[in-house]
Amino acid sequence: MEATRTLAAFAATLRFEDLPPEVVQKATLVLLDFVGNTFGGNVLAETKPLLAYVRALGGDAPGHGAWSGLQDLPPDCGLRDGSSG
């Protein structure tokens, strides 16, 4: 439990200015990679069966897919967005 408290205290006091430029650059690349792959993955033919499956689950749920515009349960959003990205 002490490790958790130590990590939480570190995270709570961390400022953007404290991050090394290399960390900021890598985080930026990772975020752009995620966005590009998720956005691009939703239009691939290989993703269409997965999108159809998630649509068939139906329901008016609070989750919202990253790029597909579908509203589903959060686990279904994770399945869809994680698989397409």
Image: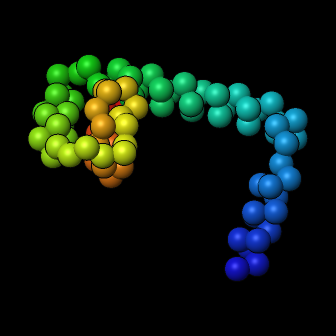
Q: Give me the residue at 16% from left, 28% from top.
A: 48
Total number of numbered discs in the rendering: 0
Image coordinates of residue 64 in percent, x first then y, are 37, 37
Q: What residue appears at the point 80 percent right and 55 percent down from the top-left corner?
A: 12
Note whether 38 is above or below 80 in the view shown: above
Q: Is residue 63 above or below residue 65?
A: below
Report whether 27 appears left or right of 6.
Answer: left
At 71% from the left and 71% from the top, the residue drawn is 4
Is 33 above or below relative to 18? above
Is 83 on the left or on the right of 36, as rendered? left
Quadrant in which the N terminus is drawn: bottom right
Coloration of the structure image: rainbow
Residue 33 point in image, percent of width and height: 50, 27
In the image, 18 versus 63, the foreground residue is 63
Q: Residue at x 82, y 62 (%)?
A: 9
Find the residue positioned furthest to the front: 60
Q: Quarter of the image containing the C terminus?
A: top left
Q: Nearer the viewer, residue 15 or 36?
A: 15
**Side of 19 relative to 83 (left or right):** right
x%, y% of residue 41?
Answer: 31, 26
> Looking at the rendering, which quadrant does residue 60 occupy?
top left
Location of residue 15 in the rendering, given as x and y in whole percent from the top left corner:
85, 42
Res. 43 image quadrant: top left
Give left or right: position of 72 versus 49. Answer: right
Can residue 10 be spotted in the picture? yes
- Whether residue 83 can be seen here: no
